[in-house]
């Protein structure tokens, strides 16, 4: 059966190099997923479930598996740069795709700006000279200038940096697990009772966002080798590794601190490491949190500028954003533009009033992508060879949609109102731009 044509199916990412393999994409997803949150989340989950905290991790892993399976099938069918934006664009057309691109751009910009500000703040806490606003601004400018320079010079160089940051952020966690497992007290890991489903659900809702981040790593779809094979393998492997890391860290922290873990909300892993490694262990965990923040930003700089490039390539934003460097084969204009915008956002901190958008925007994107995975399969869209096929037909997309709708039901009216305003403004911009074209 021949592939069905699509509105965007004849477009290609001319000039880009397909250099991202399974290992590279897996590392990128792990880097985007395991952020600084793991250094504080064990205390929050322990406060809700105690020693039964692993139940929440398993619940989140199952819920996220439903979603990433949909990402896998969509990514195996659409090989264009843009990630979720490209999947949704091909499935539902340019208007819905543009709205998805706007949501992704805002979500990514607010998230990386907040993480960057937190990183600059942590440096200021360690070194007083970096505590004033001017020095903080210098740190942020230097950070984004360096990351932009790396990512302009080639996707391979950017991928290597992500590899390095992934290893660097996992090393402190590995030290804690390997050193701490010998000092775990078994009585701290015994369940006093089985937690209620509502308690597990409340903790899972908090933990869910620690499993998010796949969408960032999937944006450079046009630079992934053999996406029909690479995307499914990478997303599933990354989910398995992430779940294993979270469970090991939670178990060791619980086994070392016991009931006191739930009250150690500032730096639970630093407190756990101090139990077995002394002050050096505490410093290692604090440094690990800072490295994790830089790792997240480096991964975002590899992925998110490609969303701007895709919007420029498709005529949704100025065409200059869709240019590819003739020597380095990277979307250099999009990379530099994104770095400038996010650096300005982080320095001004004006993003705080709209930061609430990020959670609802992410879930809305996930819902659209789940629907896109079904539509792409229904039309049998194929851009990169034989696609990954979900078992059970529409059962998994339907289950994933139900999960996302349940998570969205936990959001506030204010969050939905902010998203509605942004989408309305984006729709007006789209209409006006189409008329001028």
Image (cartoon, rainbow, N blue to C red):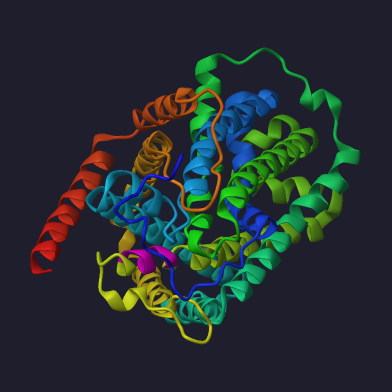
- Closest to the observer: 282 or 148? 148
Q: Is residue 321 left or right of residue 201?
A: left
Q: Is residue 281 above or below residue 144?
A: above
Q: Is residue 120 above or below residue 207?
A: below
Residue located at (72% from left, 63% from top): 168
Residue located at (56% from left, 40% from top): 388
Q: Which quadrant would residue 339 be assigned to in this image? A: bottom left
Q: Is residue 288 above or below residue 153?
A: above
- Closest to the observer: 204 or 28? 28
Q: Is residue 134 left or right of residue 76?
A: left
Residue located at (8% from left, 63% from top): 435
Q: Residue furthest right?
A: 182
Q: Is residue 247 left or right of residue 374?
A: right
| Percent of width and height locating residue 288 | 69, 60
Residue located at (79% from left, 56% from top): 281
Q: Which quadrant would residue 44 be assigned to in this image? A: top right
**Magenta highlight range:** 306-311
């Amino acid at each position: 059966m021949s592939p069905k044509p699509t509105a965007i199916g004849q477009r290609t990412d001319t000039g880009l190099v397909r250099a991202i393999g399974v290992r590279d994409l897996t590392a990128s997803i792990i880097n985007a997923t395991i952020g600084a949150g793991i250094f504080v989340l064990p205390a929050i989950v322990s406060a809700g479930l105690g020693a039964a905290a692993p139940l929440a991790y398993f619940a989140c892993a199952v819920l996220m598996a439903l979603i990433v399976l949909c990402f896998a099938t969509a990514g195996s069918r659409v090989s264009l740069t843009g990630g979720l934006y490209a999947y949704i664009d091909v499935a539902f057309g340019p208007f819905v795709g543009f709205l998805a691109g706007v949501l992704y751009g805002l979500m990514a910009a607010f998230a990386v700006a907040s993480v960057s500000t937190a990183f600059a703040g942590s440096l200021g806490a360690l070194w007083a000279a970096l505590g004033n606003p001017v020095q903080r601004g210098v740190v942020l400018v230097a950070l984004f200038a360096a990351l932009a320079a790396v990512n302009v010079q080639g996707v391979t160089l950017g991928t290597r940096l992500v590899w390095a940051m992934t290893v660097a952020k996992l090393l402190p966690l590995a030290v804690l697990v390997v050193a701490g497992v010998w000092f775990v007290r078994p009585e701290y890991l015994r369940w006093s009772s089985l937690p209620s489903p509502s308690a597990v659900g409340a903790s899972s809702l908090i933990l869910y966002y620690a499993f998010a981040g796949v969408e960032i790593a999937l944006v450079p779809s046009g630079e992934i080798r053999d996406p029909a094979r690479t995307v499914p393998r990478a997303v599933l492997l990354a989910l398995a590794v992430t779940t294993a890391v979270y469970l090991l860290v939670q178990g060791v922290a619980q086994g070392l601190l016991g009931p006191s873990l739930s009250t150690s909300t500032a730096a639970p892993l630093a407190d756990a490491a101090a139990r077995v490694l002394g002050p050096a262990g505490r410093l290692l965990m604090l440094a690990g949190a800072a490295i994790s923040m830089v790792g997240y930003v480096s991964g975002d700089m590899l992925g998110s500028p490609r969303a701007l490039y895709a919007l420029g390539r498709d005529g949704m934003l100025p065409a200059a954003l869709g240019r590819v460097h003739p020597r380095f084969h990277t979307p250099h204009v999009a990379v530099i533009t994104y770095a400038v915008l996010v650096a300005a956002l982080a320095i001004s901190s004006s993003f705080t009033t709209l930061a609430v958008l990020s959670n609802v925007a992410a879930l809305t994107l996930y819902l659209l992508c789940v629907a896109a995975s079904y539509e792409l399969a229904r039309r049998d869209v194929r851009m990169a060879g034989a696609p990954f096929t979900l078992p059970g037909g529409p059962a998994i997309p339907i289950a994933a949609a139900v999960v996302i709708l349940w998570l969205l039901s936990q959001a506030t009216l204010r969050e939905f109102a902010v998203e509605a305003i942004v989408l309305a403004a984006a729709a007006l911009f789209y209409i006006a731009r189409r008329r001028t074209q």
